[in-house]
Amino acid sequence: MRRTSARSRISRALAVATAVAAVAGLTAYQGVAAEPAARTLAAGSPEGYGAGTTGGAGGPTVTVTSADAFIDAAASDGPLQIQVNGTIQLDDMEKVTSNKTIVGTGTRGRITGGGLNVSKASNVIIQNLTFSGSDDDAINVQYSTRVWIDHNDISDAYDGACDVKRASDGVTVSWNHFHDQDKNALLGHSDDNGSEDRGKLHVSYHHNWFDATTQRNPRVRFGNPVHVYNNYYYNNSGYGVASTEEAGVLVEGNYFENVKDPYHLGEADSGPGSLVARNNQLVNSGSGQTGGSVSTPSYSYRLDPAANVKSIVTSGSGVGHV
């Protein structure tokens, strides 16, 4: 009954948004506000493997302030731009469908208690949100393509902070502040999932702040190449990057500070992949382990000098900096 009521409000809001798309104005319905379609919520555009992701651009905009409204907006059909204003308390992993932009308002957009499940979807943007205290993952991406996860603050998820797996492809994870997290960013579901994952799992991780996150920053299976560049690693007590099970990871232009094990091959029962490291800054950190060859990323990109990455990332990552 709770979900039916919210769905009715979303449907009414979207109908009004479509009707007034050519004029200025805002129509509110019990925590759901609909706006004209001309507005594009997401700031900037993705670099790396998620380039070209546009989310809900071209669709109407709704502003949500309740869990009911958010759940039904995220799972609705068609392009939609969802503006989160306030704290959304979730009880589970909630589905995000194709052609969605989900953006927090200022520093007020928060998701807690549960997380977002981007499953069997394409063209999704998640930006400028604070995630905390999920009883599962904060963000899970599976069987999905063209996903951009950008400028979020992510902490204290029971399982993974930001996991990408099960044949997903074309993903960029950028400018996020990860902290207070053990298992952080898994890439690749399991050692026996190669039949789905080979030739997929192309992900770019750039300008993220891995702030004392223990491990999996990321931990990679099968994806080749996976591009990890211009990130700031600080006090990671387990390890920074692990390349396993046929993966090929390029670790480039990062700043590692107080990280005894910045990168290595193999992890737990997973066999070694390949890892190439170049132009990294290692401050009070180990030398890392490399081996094998890695395919060249298929896109152009701008690389900041590693010596400048700490200041660039700490001043520009997370919520409120888009």
Image: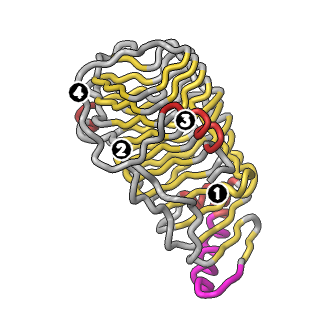
- Looking at marks 4 and 1 on the same chain, the residue that comes earlier in the sequence is marked by 1
Q: Nearer the viewer, mark 3 or mark 2?
A: 3
| Alpha carbon distance from label 3 to label 4 | 27 Å
Frontmost of labels 1 and 2 is 2
Q: Nearer the viewer, mark 4 or mark 2?
A: 4
Density class for disc 3 (Cα within 10 Å; few <14, some 14-19, many ≥20) is some
Task: Report which residue position mark 2 lands on.
Answer: 168
Residue 254 percent coordinates (x, y)? 47, 31
Answer few, some or many: residues within 10 Å of disc 4's Cα (few below 14, many 20 plus, some between 14 and 19): some
SS under mark 2? loop
Q: In the rendered structure, which amino acid carries the disc numbered 1?
A: Phe
Identified by mark 2, the residue type is: Ser
Tell me how far mark 1 sits from mark 2, CA to CA.
24 Å
Q: Determine the residue positioned at 62% across, 54% down.
A: 322
Q: Which residue is mark 1?
A: 70
Amino acid type, residue under disc 4 in the picture: Ser
Q: Residue at x 76, y 67 (%)?
A: 30
> Could you tell which of marks 4 and 2 lies nearer the N-terminus?
2
Residue 130 visible in this rendered orientation of the protein: yes
Q: Which mark is residue 308?
A: 3
Q: Which residues are magenta?
A: 7-25
Q: Are marks 3 and 4 in contact (CB under 8 Å)?
A: no
How far, Cα to Cα, is label 3 from label 2?
32 Å
Q: Position of residue 281 (x, y in %)?
A: 48, 25
| Residue 92 visible at all | no
Q: Tell me if label 1 and label 2 are in contact, CB under 8 Å.
A: no
**Marked residue nearer the N-terminal end (1 or 2):** 1
- The residue depicted at 66 percent of the width and 73 percent of the height is 34
Q: Is residue 158 above or below residue 34?
A: above
Q: Label 4, on which residue? A: 293
